[in-house]
Image (cartoon, rainbow, N blue to C red):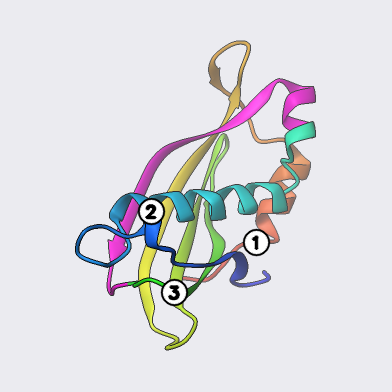
Amino acid sequence: MTGWIETHRNVVTTWDCDHQGHMNTVKYYEKFDVAGWHMIQRSGARRERLEADQTGCVDVRMELDFLGEMMVNDPLLIESGVEKIGNTSFTFRSRMSNVNTGEIVAYGRCTTVYFDLAKREKKLLPDDIRAGLEALLINED
C-alpha cells in the first residue's frame, strides 16, 4: 500500500465561483473527476491501453461530502487512494484540502466499472491493472 497520493493541485479561480463568492458545487465534481482520471492512469489503465483493448472506465457512482469552503485564489490539493477492488470495478476515495490552512474541505468517493466499449458491458479487470490498483490501496480513516 502506498497510502494517499497527490492526484490534483490547482488554485480556485473566479470562474470556479458562484454568485456567493465560493467555489461552486459543479466545480468540486469537476476537480474530483480530474483526480479520478489520474488514479485510473496510475493503475496502468492509460488512454493508449484502453483504446487498444477497446475498453473504458465508466463512473457509476460519485458521492461528495462538503466540509468547508474554497474561495478565489485558495490553493487546493486533492489526494486519492483505492478503497475497494471488485471483479469488474473499483472504488476510490479522494480528499480535497486548502493548502494554505491544511483544512480538508471535501471528501469524494467514486465507483468505476471496467467496461467493454464494443459489447457495452462490464468486463473483468485485467491482472496488471488489478495489481496497479492494489498498489494504491488505502486504509480506512
N-term mark: 3 or 1: 3
Q: How crowded is mark 2: few (under 14 residues within 10 Å), some or many (20 or more)?
A: some
**Residue 132, how many percent across, how many down?**
73, 52
- The residue tagged with tag 1: helix, strand or loop? loop
Q: Which of 111 and 47 is in front in this view?
A: 47
Q: Which amino acid does label 1 sit on?
A: Leu
**Residue 141, how many percent across, how many down?**
43, 76
Q: What stretch is highlighted in magenta?
A: 49-69
N-term mark: 2 or 1: 2
Q: What residue type is labelled 3?
A: Asn
Label 3 belongs to which residue?
A: 73
Q: Tell which tag, 2 or 1, sits nearer the viewer.
A: 2
Label 2 belongs to which residue?
A: 27
Which quadrant does the N terminus fall into? Answer: bottom right
Label 1 belongs to which residue?
A: 136
| Residue 41 vertical placement versus 83 (above, below) | above
**Residue 101, how many percent across, how many down?**
42, 88
